[in-house]
Image: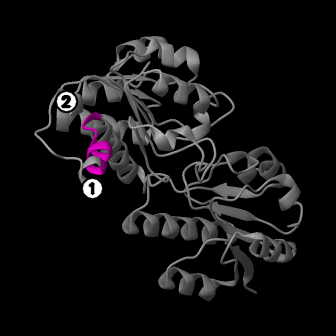
Amino acid sequence: MKKHVVLYKKLSAPLMARLHEQANVTLIESLDEGGLAQLRDALPSAQGLLGASLRLDAKLLDLAPHLEAVASVSVGVDNYDIDYLTQRGILLSNTPDVLTETTADTGFALILATARRLVELTNMVRAGNWNQNIGPLHFGSDVHGKTLGIIGMGRIGEALAQRGHFGFGMPVIYHSHSPKPLVEQRFGAQYRSLPQLLEQADFVCLTLPLTAETQGLIGAKEFALMGPKTIFINISRGKVVDEAALIDALQQRTIRAAGLDVFEREPLNHDSPLLHLNNVVATPHIGSATHETREAMARCAVDNLLTALAGERPKNLVNEAAWKH
């Protein structure tokens, strides 16, 4: 008998066909109030869940007594109560690797855009205010040869280091929970304490996951350690940063600029001061948002889910203890 899978994310036709071949599928097309009601109605018979961008807490998952596996179309798993899932023996999987290069591309795009003030100056041209040759008032800064500081040296951090080291001749310094000898060997990277990195880097880039330890990691004290020429880049999670402290640092020019793909609250509030600062490049969480990468992520999630529902260990299992449950 086919198992019941609930999707709360639309998939491509080939992936939908594959799921329909192997499972009974309920598709929740929207996560608005009506869609969430549909989801709650479908959970009592669900054995598999697949989706992203929805907080799955114990209260919601208590409605799914037969649940065996959850496949997240994401790398980050901060939307899931992992302890609860593990206690129930529910397998949680994610989609690492397939979005590494694309997200690193986004990070480097933000580095270039902030350093060369691309958004600000594009808006100036579009507004018809380019009336004379550009002078020092509108100059940007070089990227090549500058020090790239990476906080969180996982897959995406390594991909960012590769771009900086080989593409732009940037000295790479990094802070992580432990030194990475292979990264140091490949990119000439040097480990730094967090305060040292903040003081020495021209570009401070966050590529670490959101955990209890990293939430609020960068606040007023950390921005004060940076210099007025420092550019701050965040492609990790918004809650790793104290957003009020970031806004103050940008307004006071404690740091030079910020390139931000993630925010404490998403979508970004319409009244956020970040929308009115010329030294901010803000994008709507596009880290992995290409056709090729999103399809690869969805394919990976489908693989994970079907493997788990077949009673086998999925390749990208997050909570190993649930497999041994």
Magenta highlight: main SS: helix
**Above or below 231: residue 113:** below
- The percent coordinates of residue 254 (x first, y second) are 44, 18
Please name the residue that numbered disc 1 is placed on: 126
Please name the residue that numbered disc 2 is placed on: 142
Magenta highlight on residue 67: no
Q: Nearer the viewer, residue 232 or 132?
A: 132
Residue 192 is left or right of residue 43, and the answer is left
**Above or below 252: residue 13:** below
Q: Amino acid type of disc 1? A: Arg
Residue depicted at 29% across the width and 53% down the height: 127
- The percent coordinates of residue 141 (x first, y second) are 22, 29
Q: Amino acid type of disc 2? A: Asp
Crowding near pointer 1: few (<14 within 10 Å), some, many (20+)?
few
Residue 197 is left or right of residue 115, and the answer is right
- The percent coordinates of residue 108 (x first, y second) are 31, 42
Quadrant position of residue 310: bottom right
Residue depicted at 24% across the width and 23% down the height: 171
Residue depicted at 44% across the width and 50% down the height: 283
Quadrant position of residue 239: top right
- The percent coordinates of residue 237 (x first, y second) are 56, 41
Figure coloring? one colour
Q: In the structure shown, which secondary structural element does the residue marked by tag 1 occupy? A: helix
Q: Nearer the viewer, residue 110 or 279?
A: 279
Residue depicted at 53% across the width and 28% down the height: 246
Q: Which residues are magenta?
A: 115-123
